[in-house]
Image (cartoon, rainbow, N blue to C red):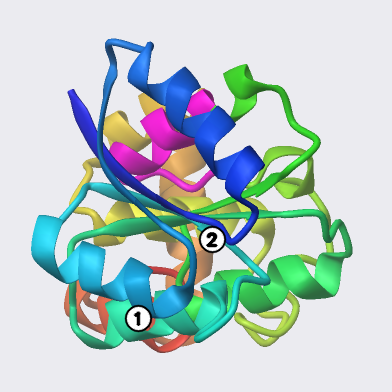
Amino acid sequence: MITIIIADDHKIFRQGLSRLLADDDRFKLLGEASNGKEALNLIWKEKPQVAVLDLSMPRPDGLEVVSSIRAAHSNTRCIILTMKDDIETVRRALESGVYGYVLKEAAYEEIAEAIVKVADNKLYLGRFQDNPNLYASCCEGQLTNREVEVLRCVVRGLTSRQIASELFISHRTVETHRQHIMEKLNIRTATGLAGYAREHGLI
């Protein structure tokens, strides 16, 4: 069962999502918050696997909460919920360290899918996932979207065969991507790749 907290200053939306999650036996809701300060206090207290955060909530906002969690090296993974559907905001969220980005217009099924994936240490960006401009700043234009996905998997300690299975590509393709990543970044060790990924907000 995946443990979750929700933070959103819109009470009706927050309560509605809370009821849906409470009725889903995959999840255990540990608490709700109406602003960033309450969200951080709840996260430090309950240590949820996933925090679902409103981008624009007050004191501090969603991305500031994510940055605080990341700075504290917390194991809580964050999903941003928002009405903003521009790629620049998605990129800023990714750089802050989010693992999921979901629009508030999404159906519950998509929010639930994002929670499940993020709890499994996977990135969920919905329809933004394959946007060619998504990683332009956080990777300085060096890596393709697929290479970033492979890099995330490498940093998680997955083998090439495990990465191939997770990304639905061949083992040989994974090896090619790994080679390209190392050549582009001029990094030859897993520790070095982990440091790069952390510096650029990929983990």
In primary-sequence order, the first of circles 2 and 1 is: 2
Q: Residue at x 61, y 80 (%)?
A: 139
From the viewer's side, name the closer residue of 190 and 110.
110
The spot of residue 183 in percent (x, y) is 49, 77
Which mark is nearer the camera, 2 or 1? 1
Which is the main secondary structure of the residues drawn in magenta?
A: helix
The spot of residue 142 in percent (x, y) is 66, 79
Badge 1 marks a residue whose secondary structure is helix
Position of the C terminus, as image quadrant, is bottom left
Instruction: Tell whether 141 sits left or right of 118.
Output: right
- The amino acid pointed to by label 2 is Val
- In terms of image quadrants, where is residue 135? bottom right
* Residue 188 seen in render: no
CA distance for labels 2 and 1: 12 Å
The span shown in magenta is 112-124
From the viewer's side, name the closer residue of 74 and 13.
13
Q: Residue at x 30, y 74 (%)?
A: 40
* Residue, disc 2: 148
Question: Is residue 60 highlighted in magenta?
Answer: no
Q: Residue at x 22, y 47 (%)?
A: 49
Q: Residue at x 29, y 42 (%)?
A: 4
Badge 2 marks a residue whose secondary structure is helix
Badge number at residue 144: none
Badge number at residue 198: 1
Instruction: Tell whether 201 sits left or right of 82.
Output: left
The spot of residue 127 in percent (x, y) is 78, 39
Position of the N terminus, as image quadrant, is top left
Instruction: Tell whether 94 sits left or right of 165.
Output: right
Q: Is residue 73 above or below residue 1?
A: below
